[in-house]
Image (spheres, grey):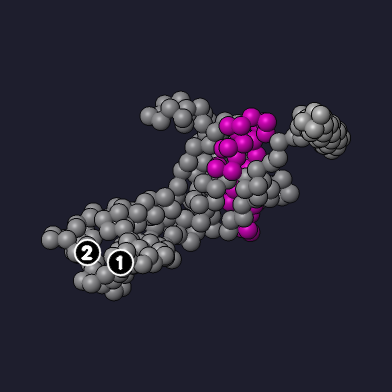
Amino acid sequence: MLTLKISLNNIKSTLITCVSLSVKNDYRYNFFQSQILPRFLSTTQSLSSQIGRKPITYPSEVTITHDPTPITQTQIQADLFSTTLTISGPLGTHSMPIKPYVKLNFNDSKKNDKNTSKDKSSDESVFVDDSDQDKKLSVEVRDKTIKQQRQMWGTTRALINNCVIGVSEGYRVLVRFSGVGYRANMEDDKLVLRIGYAHPVIMDVPDDIKCITPSPTKVILSGTDKQRVFQFAANIRKHKPPEPYNQKGIFVGDETIKKKVSKKK
């Protein structure tokens, strides 16, 4: 009889525990189900490019010429059927292809027709913006819902802005040498680097880049093409990249590197 009572008590306690757990689980399930809101598909429109929609302000000494004639013969397949944009300034001239779905709006030309002119000698459709005051240029695309056009929107605006700065102000970058015996100098229009190797590293300087060495541990590169100036600086840096333990190497611009503590046994 005693064993029977004990077994009945165990069964009762087990049943009570199971019932209480099931009630709790049902309560939690109903509570979380009530908190979950139905999900809907997004119907928001695609946002405009944060960079592409900013207008480009360029000085009066810079002249922008847009030739809408499509490019039919080119070695670069991506530039096929693109138009040509020529940017001229006191430091030089740059030309770049513009995709056919990219539209250029010269804001001052809409307000005052006297500030713009058309080169009728070559082609009546060629637009030349040669006003005497600061001008603005805005970039737009044909269809903002297409991913490729949205990608090229900001890219085209950035490339045009780089060309405007290049022909008006130019680009300068400082290359610093940090290390015992590291130095650089110009010999016969070539840049000679002595950076700890058994032989000096001799580099040809591109024609459109000016290279000066104000001190043995500093090299200043200047030019109108941002990509070529910084690419040449990167080519110099790759011969001796900065290392974090002694912080020696070739640094470009304001580049810094976090010092690491050497491993000790």
In the depicted structure, whether residue 4 falls above or below residue 117: above
Left or right of residue 222, residue 17 in this image: right
Q: Residues within 10 Å of mark 1 (few under 14, many from 20)?
A: few
Q: Residue at x 49, y 44 (%)?
A: 86
Q: Residue at x 62, y 55 (%)?
A: 57
Image quadrant in which you'd find residue 205: bottom left
Secondary structure category for the residue under label 2: loop
Q: Is residue 182 visible?
A: yes
The reply to whether discs 1 and 2 touch (Cβ–Cβ < 8 Å) is no
Q: Quadrant of the C terminus?
A: bottom left
Outermost residue on the bottom side: it is: 215
Query: In this view of the protein, which residue sits in the foreground, 104 or 16?
Result: 16
Amino acid type, callout 2: Ile
Q: At which x and y percent is residue 132?
A: 61, 58
Magenta segment includes 153: yes
Q: At which x and y percent is residue 161?
A: 54, 51
Q: Residue at x 23, y 68 (%)?
A: 182
Q: At which x and y percent is residue 81?
A: 51, 27
Magenta segment includes 125: no
Secondary structure category for the residue under label 1: loop
Which segment is the magenta one?
129-156
Q: Which mark is residue 264?
A: 1
Outermost residue on the left side: it is: 198
Amino acid type, callout 1: Lys
Q: Is residue 22 visible?
A: no
Left or right of residue 202, residue 242 in this image: right
- Residue where numbered disc 2 is placed: 195
Query: In this view of the protein, which residue sits in the foreground, 251 or 128?
Result: 251
Query: In this view of the protein, which residue sits in the foreground, 182 or 31?
Result: 31
Left or right of residue 36, residue 162 in this image: left
In the depicted structure, whether residue 158 falls above or below residue 61: above
